[in-house]
Image: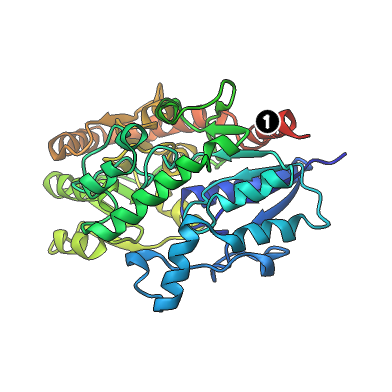
Amino acid sequence: MTLSCLQVNKFWYPRAGAEIYALGLSEALERAGVTVHVLSTRHPSNLPRPQSSAWPRYYELSRGGAALSPLARLRALSAIFYNPSAARAVRTLLRGTRVDVAHVHNFTKHLGPAVLRALAEAGVPSVATLHDYWPVCPTYSLLRGDGTVCDAACAREGGKACVRYRCAAPGLPVNLVSALEFDLHRFLGWGLPQIDRVIAPSRFLASVIGEAGVRAGQLIVVPHPRPRRTWEPPPGKEGGLRVLYVGRLAKEKGIHVLIDAARRAGCRLDVAGTGPMESELRRQSAGDDNIRFLGFLAPDQVLAAMRASHVVAVPSIWYENAPLVVLEALATGRVVAASAIGGIPEYLAGVPGARLLRPGSVEDWQRALEDLEGSASELTELGRRAWEASAAAPGWAEHAEQVRDIYRSVAR
C-alpha cells in the first residue's frame, strides 16, 4: 500500500531555508511513490495545493502585527497560544483522506501546537524536522537582544530569561508574549512530547535540543541532502575576487561584518536578499562601488549568481543549523568561507578550500578575503573538488528513502 504523508509548514512557497527544504522533500517523496498532502496557512504567495481553501488564515506578525487591525491583532495574539482554526483545518483535511504520518516543519506562531494536538487526537503519528531552536528558545534563534549568542537559558529557567535579555524585541510587551507562549506550551506538554520522532539536521542542534528533554530513540540526526548541479568553472579573475552573500539581511546573519571586511579587503561583494537591516547595510556600503545589493533572488537566480562568483560567504553570528546556502554553494562548485558556529563546521568538514572563520571578527574575515584574493589561481580547482565531494554525498533520492524509513517506523 502506498504510504501517505501530511507535510506541515506555515508557508508553502520558497521563502527561506525551511520552506525550500519542505518543498524539496515533498517533491522527492512524490518521486519515490509517497502520496503527499499539505497543511499551511493561506499566505498570498503560497504555491497552489489541493484543500488549501481549508487552511487557516494567515496573519502578518512582523513589527508586532502593526499592519493588522486591532481586532485582527487580538485574533493573531490568541492564535499564538492556541489556534483553533489550525486544529479544524487538520480535522477537515483528515476527513476522507488517509494520512499515515504527519511531517511537521516550521509551525510555531502561525499554526502552533493545535496542529499536533489534532493529529494526536486523530491517531496520526508525527515526525518533526527542526530548522531552528523552538523547543529551547522563545525566539527560536538562541540569540539575545544585544546580538550575543545564548546557551539555551530558557530551557533551564523558563521564558523569564527571554524577558531579562529582551531577546524578542527592545520593548517589554513582545518579550512577555514570547515568554508566556514558551512557558505555557511547555507546562501543557505541547510540542516535543507530542512528536514521535524528531529529526535534527546537525549534531550540534541535536546536542542543544537535548536541553529540552527528549525520550530515548525520539531524536535522530539526519543531515540535509546535497543538491545536484552541473559543474561550471568560476569566471575569470579580471576585476578581482567576487564574493557572494545570499540570505536574510538581519543582524544574526553577520552581513555587516562581511561588508566591513570586504571594504577593507577591496574585493567585490554581491549581496542577495532582503530583511530588516537593508537600509542600514546600504548606508554602511555607501560610496563603495564594489558592493552591490541584488535584492531577493529566485532559486534559479541564486544559482546564476553563484556561478558568477568565486567565493560564497556565510558570516553568521548565530548558531546556524544547516544553512542550505552552504550546500547549494558546494553543489555549484564554489569555495565557501563561513563562520565556525552551530552546525556549519559539520557540513564543511573535509571540504577542499573551505574556510571556517571566527564569528563576528572583521579582522579574520578581512584576512581570509585577502588570502583568497591572493590564491585566486587555485579557486577553480578547489571549487571543482568541492563539487565532486558534494556529488558523492547523499542527494534527494537517498534522503527521501531515509525519511520514508522513519515514516514507516512510526506509522500505525
> In terms of depth relative to the viewer, which is nearer, 62 or 343?
62
Image coordinates for residue 131, horizontal then vertical, percent: 47, 42
Image height of 177 relative to 227, above or below = below
Q: Residue at x 55, y 39 (%)?
A: 129
Query: Callout 1: few (<14), some (14-19), or many (20+) C-alpha neighbours within 10 Å?
Result: some
Kindly identify the amino acid type of the residue bearing the numbered disc 1. Answer: Ile
Q: What x and y, as percent, mark residue 396?
A: 62, 38
Could you tell me which secondary element the residue under label 1 belongs to?
helix
* Vertical comparison of 353 with 318: above or below: above
At x 40% / y 46%, what residue is drawn?
182
388 or 156: which is nearer to us? 156
94 to the left or right of 381: right
Q: Which residue is mark 1?
A: 406
Q: Quadrant of the N terminus?
A: top right
Quadrant housing residue 55:
bottom right
Q: Residue furthest right?
A: 1
Task: Look at the image and tell me whether residue 242 can be seen.
Answer: no
Question: Which residue is more in the foreground, 106 or 271?
Answer: 106
Quadrant where the C terminus sits is top right
Would residue 150 be seen by someone viewing this image from the given angle?
yes
Image coords of residue 244 (percent x, y) = 32, 49
Q: Nearer the viewer, residue 374 or 245?
A: 245
